[in-house]
Image: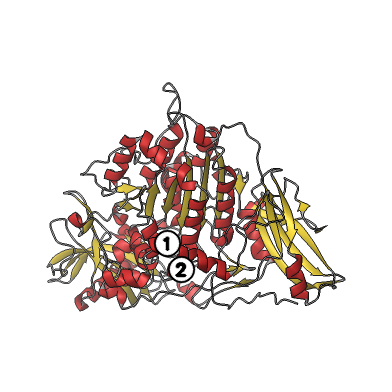
Amino acid sequence: MLSPVFAYKCVGFCFFVLIIISVLPNYNLPDYGTKNSELEKDLTENTTRINLHSKLIEEKKDLVDSASSLYFVESSKCKIPYVDPFDAEVSAIYKPLVFESCSNDSGLVTPVYNKVSRHYVLHINETLAAQILNSSSIEYNCFYQEVIRNSYRDGYDVLEAKYFSQDYVVPRHVQGLVSTCHRLGNDSHILQADGFTLIQYAEHSSKNQSSEDPARRKPSVIMFGIDNLSRINLRRTMPKVYNFLTRKGWYEMQGYNKIGDNTYPNLLAILTGHSLDSVRDDICDFKVRGCMDRYPFVWKLFQEAGYLTAFAEDEPGMSTFNYIKPGFVEQPTDYYQRPSQKAFEALLPQWKCPECTMKYCIGRRITSSYIYDFGSEFVRRYVDERPIWGLFWTNSFSHDHYQMPSKMEDFVLQYLLDFEADGVYEQSIVIFLSDHGNRYGQLVGLSSGFLENRLPTMFIYLPPWFRAHYPEYTRALQQNQRRLTSNYDLYNTLVHLIDLGNPKNTPKWPRSPSCPKCHSLFEVADAERTCEDAGIPEHYCTCVPFKTVSAKWTERIAPLVIRNINGYLEERNLTGICANLTLKYIHRTEMKIDLDKNYHEKSPSFEVGVYRTKFKVKQGGADFEATVSFNNATETVKVEMPSISRVNSYEKTAKCVENKIDRLYCICLSSLNE
């Protein structure tokens, strides 16, 4: 009998590559499992085009054009400093992590796709079953439970068990399932359990993409997202992936600047063209159930243009449209992985690696592999037949720790290489992106922390046919690599792609309503563009950057801000119910570097300067961030109260006051006694 933990601490590789079964010549297997030796062979064959991590650090190769290596973007209106991902400051704390396999076990049950009949069959590895039972004479049974979507809270239901025999043909309505094999007559003796999301074939009338007239051809668009990954940290933790993304046809948006704090506002801007305020004011409040179904998500536009659409995201408990939100009532895209992912979390064993704060393994496989396998199957099913759009987003290995992507470098690279083997780069536009960089932790405390936070990864790949047919768009994208761009520009680019191939008199889809001056990345951006032009709020703008300073004298700023908060509470006659705040510690202090100053020189000392300080108070563990003018001679700060931000939840600690601003600064005395 196998342990349900499935030997999680075996160190090695567990990637998911194409397997051909000789007895089933017309069957195409999804990437649901392979032996470590096969993966190692695959990676060895690709070493000629991959730089080793140690070599990259040693050589410290230039990662931007040598003509302007000091800045990602440099103009009279915007200077975004280049950050060396391997400078001495970060090298002192950074250590690459080692990949860990969830299991060395092969799959006992595998969904096999028959390209002729366009059906999945469930194939049982009978040899493996005999090995697990240590006998070929002991009988066993296998069953599956279908996973279906439940619209309530965007959840799932699991249907009753259905037993099956070898090469059972899966009904086409089954989108997700959990399979279990157990010893005959002993339900508790589990041989293996596994979970699968299926990309069942949808009939259509589209012509083969590769044979269409380029003037009318609509490119497929595949978006491959990793949460919390700055372009700087990508170079540091995934140099092999970075090296792949710098090959011919790829374009890096080096001036791509986030527009919001966390995932939701940044993805919302990419997928709807709206800011948080405009979507709430113009459409509805996302807190209301059913509201998000009314949002003008770009996948709806793709669907109207004849695309098949897919969306998948791991860690469903904190996913972008469900964390502290009701999610969708109607299924948002044609293929939607969330119900299956939630079921897999509930029904299969889980394991966390020593460095992990999130689930590293679900069942036999890496948590994010369910998302990437879903995306690979979707692309493999349709990329040669019809235009498709998909967003495949992972949080599990990158959200909480900046070093974790290094653990997954080869894992992610293999999927990019599999896309190549499946012909994706011949047909499709591929966008490799993130939402933001690290917002807390060790990196944020470095001198480059301001930039690490605000400059997410953004690479765009154009296939050969697109570059040949649209040379003007290709040139514009190339020029825009070193210009300030934002999430709203990416939204406009997606809409622009939908409009391609339409007759000239066809109405154009509307561009971003929240950024009137934003445009498609296939149009050259103004070299003198400002953050305001790009819809980037000042707080997140890197054009006039802030730089972390650690000089002892900066420790005087936070206590002065706290004094202002306590003075405000006193003026409001709230000292009887709100605590007097005292400093616990300072997260960081940053100084604004004006455009006429050199960011890369030692931080100068000014009598009066603009600073941003983030700190924690002892009362209630409240965190605050303030932008202030500090006079080093008189030891005074100038700060407007609303610009002192409360940066963690105050729902439970400010119940004793009702005024919106009061709630930001009041830590109720009653809450401290609870």
Q: Is residue 237 visible?
A: yes
Q: Is residue 615 visible?
A: no
Q: Horizontal and vertical percent for residue 324? A: 54, 57
Image position of 459 with respect to 547: above or below: above
Q: Is residue 164 left or right of residue 67?
A: right
Q: Circle 1 sits on which residue?
A: 228
Mark identifier at residue 186: none
Classify mark 1: helix, strand or loop: loop
Mark identifier at residue 400: 2
Residue 166 lies in quadrant: bottom right
Q: Nearer the viewer, residue 191 or 285?
A: 191
Q: Horizontal and vertical percent for residue 235? A: 35, 63
Q: Nearer the viewer, residue 478 or 361?
A: 478
Classify mark 2: helix, strand or loop: loop
User: Which residue is situated farthest in the top direction here?
Assistant: 505
Q: Horizontal and vertical percent for residue 458? A: 37, 53
